[in-house]
Amino acid sequence: MADKLNTQKSVKIAAGAVVCVESEIRGDVTIGPRTVVHPKARIIAEAGPIVIGEGNLIEEQALIINSYPENIMPDSEMEPKTMTIGINNVFEVGCVSQALKIGDNNVIESKADVGRNVILTSGCIIGAFCQVNTCEVIPENTVIYGSGCMRRVQTERPQPQTLQLDFLMKILPNYHHLKKTVKAGQTS
Amino acid sequence: MASLLQPNRVVYLVRGEKNIIAPLSQLYFCRYCSELRSLECVSHEVDSHYCPSCLENMPSAEAKLKKNRCANCFDCPCCMHTLSTRATNIPAPVPDDPTKTTMKKAYYLACGFCRWTSRDVGMADKSVASGGWQEPENPHAQRIGKLIEYYQQLAHREKQERDRKKLTRRRQCMPLAFSEKYGLGTRLQRQRPGAPLSNLAGLSLKEGEDQKEISIEPAQALDEVEPLPEDFYTRPVSLPEVTTLRQRLLQPDFQPAGASQLHPRHKHLLMKRSLRCRKCEHNLSKPEFNPTSIKFKIQLVAVSYIPEVRIMSIPNLRYMKESQVLLTLTNPVENITHVSLAACEEDDPDDINRTAQVILVPNTQLVLAGKDAAAEYDELAEPQDFQDDPDVVAFRKSNKIGFFIKVIPQKEEDTDVTVAFKMRHDFRNLAAPVRPSDEGGDAAAEAIWLTHHVELRLGPLAP
């Protein structure tokens, strides 16, 4: 048990990532290079570590949380599951993501709610205010939109937001303090 | 508490061809007939057409030609949102030197809501920002055009025969404009619901000329229908490729079953309408011509003439127990209004929804001060002194008054407690022409007393 407590409950931020100090990052979180985390974003790893790839854009008030499923008490024999997030994803303002596996080039629009049992492949777009809490793998290039969560498949994946990321990486340090980069293996 | 201000809590009764119950904010007031009017007892007329996204005004003739669609804007065939034009840079060979490539702008249509793009259906990118997009042509366009021409001619002929018959029957000098060109405009024509094809008759512009006889072939009836494909029952359906009924029916020309054949259509125009009282033919509502303006040239809405009742607070309502409900009355006009309330009689035909009994103090007359827009800036104004009965009037604030009514719920079921009473107030008609009185003194308009039937929905009984 002591070992478990001593495992790295720290935040590892790769070089090249821009993480603002006002963001709340708790637990065992790894953030890849070229990722931008806005102030007031929350990344909370309660029930297991979170690994975030590179080139992601996590906007204000977004909540990425690896939490215990609702009706299961913590401290029971639950293996900590790692939440993996791929590259070039966009988490827009106010979204909530609990999906354990997110691929590349996905866009979760504002105030969308993605449940724990959803697996996003690549190129998926979850529209604004859509709540997806089914237990399924969303096929590639799917767009979920509308109040009835209608779906359709688009022919091309959404473009990675390189322009936006470059702009933010230049501008955010001018106005916010950033969390220090910590390489894996060190304690912060 | 905001739920007490919902519009359907306090409704007024409109007596017309049929009795309509509606909140005051949705009613109009004809000040020439001195009656409330609802949307169903007025006639609606089209004022102007405009596109909701580019706000471009379009004259009616042009609108009819373009089938009531905007020339510039498109609708997403997938989610019916407005499409926006996006540009990309594509390398294109320079015409002079085939080895070099320059960046040329290519435009495509994209929907911001469902991420549909024009490339999904195979429409090539255009090199001009607007005007390059074509709608696919209807395969039956020719046959439909021919049928329309034939029926226009038929309608024209029928109209001429009708005119001739009417003119010979009555030996009067009827003006040539007896059958109006566009039908359904004047009162005479409106009251004829079975008029044959009078709509189409108006469309024909050549009046009085003899057109060529157009003949059409009757439609061919087929004996055999195309059979279903063999794997229709066994092939699994791929839902993203099948269009929904709504998407399909928005394009009645083609009704495509596959999502890859959904082409964008031009956006439908909206129209501004003016309302006219059916009895006295005066305009009740006439908007401004400019699509960007939300004001009205004529706006005879009920809220600006009739005092409005609103619910302020409801105590716990219990079966067969008397409770006091606080209501407010607001005076919309600038002169002092006297309002008296009366309970509905037992056999009142308007009173069908009542589930509770109202006890009002008889013969109370509430006095409402006029609406004074400058009152808040005028510090030296003396507060007007009204003798208010404290049992009835709770508070008074500029042109608003709060008063109590006592309610006894009569039904024990779970339905809402509804209460009805009659409100009688005086109305000064400033619109009627002031007749020069012989005495030459009093120019104030005469007050007439109007009675309205008001119903309140007070909510469920307290558990």
Image (tube, coloured by chain):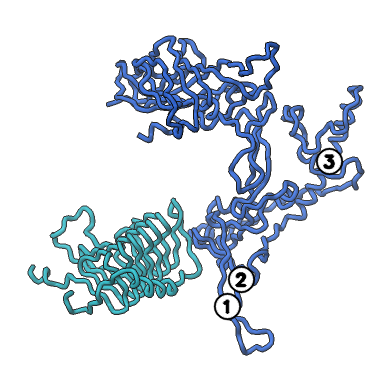
Which quadrant would the C terminus of chain B be assigned to in this image?
top left
Gap in Å between the C-alphas at discs 1 and 2? 10 Å
To which residue does mark 3 refer? B154
Mark 1 to mark 3 CA distance (whole Å)? 55 Å
Circle 1 marks a residue in which chain?
Answer: B
Which disc number belongs to residue A69?
A: none
Q: Colour of chain A?
A: cyan
* B209 w.r.t. B340: above or below: below
Q: Indicate the position of residue A78 as horizontal and vertical percent values.
A: 17, 63
Query: Which residue occupies the foreground of this view, B100 or B395?
Result: B395
List the residue tagged with mark 2. B125
The residue under the point 90% across, 46% down is: B211
- Residue picked out by circle 1: B90
How far, Cα to Cα, is label 3 from label 2?
Answer: 45 Å
Residue B234 appears in the picture as rendered: no
Furthest-front residue in view? Answer: B380
Residues at marks 1 and 2 touching, judged by CB atoms closer than 8 Å: yes
Label located before the other in sequence (3 or 2): 2
* Identity, as a three-letter code, of the amino acid under mark 1: Ile
* Residue type pointed to by label 2: Asp
Q: Quadrant of residue B84?
A: bottom right
Q: Residue extending furthest left? A: A2
